[in-house]
Amino acid sequence: MERPTVLAVGARGGLLSKIDPILERSNLTVHRVPLGRSALEMVRSKRPRLLVVAFPLLDMRLEAFLETLAADGSAAKGPAVALLADGHLLPELEPHLDEQHRFFPADMEPDELQSGILELIGDTTRVAPRLMLRLEVQLGAGKLLRMCQTDNISESGMLVRLQEAIPVGSEVRLAISLPSATDPVQVKAEVVRHTHPDLESVQGLGLRFVEFEGQGKTTLAEYLDLRGNNSHDQDGLQHP
């Protein structure tokens, strides 16, 4: 099944840093642009199902942005729009809100934010369950080779603890050691975000799995399913 496309509009970090973990662990194709005009140009070619807009936009008024978006006749129904903003800006946004354009306050709880975003996308089943497991991972990126540890992991991606800030969009090679498997799971992944130092206690990278070798995907899924069913043991380390 083709993954829905989401377009995140706004400067990296800031308000969008709250949405990044949700997009990272969702089975979505995510594009990011800093400016409203760039987003409008991309809408026609990428046909996103959802725009996540950090308000205020850096380069144009919201009214002009939404009017241009609505005037594009390339689709019978335009993309949904999630407006992420500080609460005191709600009066300015209210005239533009409807079923297709929703306001998400910056202080919204992550679970509520996730549910609202997925509801706008139209599919609430796309977030893979994420487990707080500590697994050893060998990570390679170009000439860089490091041993690191997962902070959390799902069937679609993971967060690894790492000092180096590998650029977003980079492809990395992973060898994930599972206590239940003789050989590490080999997988190519994409760097989708860096952790935000003011919002998260972990320094590292958010990774989305792209391509597994052999039966690696099945092996990982079976291990995570087993650990999920035994949630009383959450440290992820192999015990005697």
Image: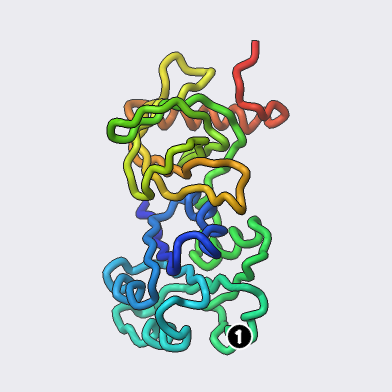
Q: Is residue 50 visible?
A: no
Left or right: residue 183 versus residue 136 is left
Residue 146 higher or lower than 127, as above or below: above
Q: Tell me the quarter of the picture where residue 85 sits.
A: bottom right
Residue 218 image point, x, y percent? 43, 29
Q: Tell me the quarter of the picture where residue 60 sits.
A: bottom left
Residue named by callout 1:
94
Residue drawn at (52%, 18%) of the image: 180
Left or right: residue 189 versus residue 233 is left
* Image quadrant containing the C terminus: top right
Residue drawn at (50%, 52%) of the image: 126
Residue 114 image point, x, y percent? 59, 58
- The residue lying furthest to the right in this view is 232
Residue drawn at (52%, 75%) of the image: 55
- What's under tag 1, amino acid-wise? Glu
Residue 104 image point, x, y percent? 60, 70
Residue 163 higher or lower than 49, as above or below: above
Q: How many marks?
A: 1
Residue 111 higher or lower than 96, as above or below: above
Question: Helix or strand or loop: what does disc 1 sit on?
Answer: helix
Residue drawn at (31%, 70%) of the image: 42
Query: Observer-nearest residue: 222 or 168?
Result: 168
Residue 82 image point, x, y percent? 52, 71
Residue 146 higher or lower than 11, as above or below: above
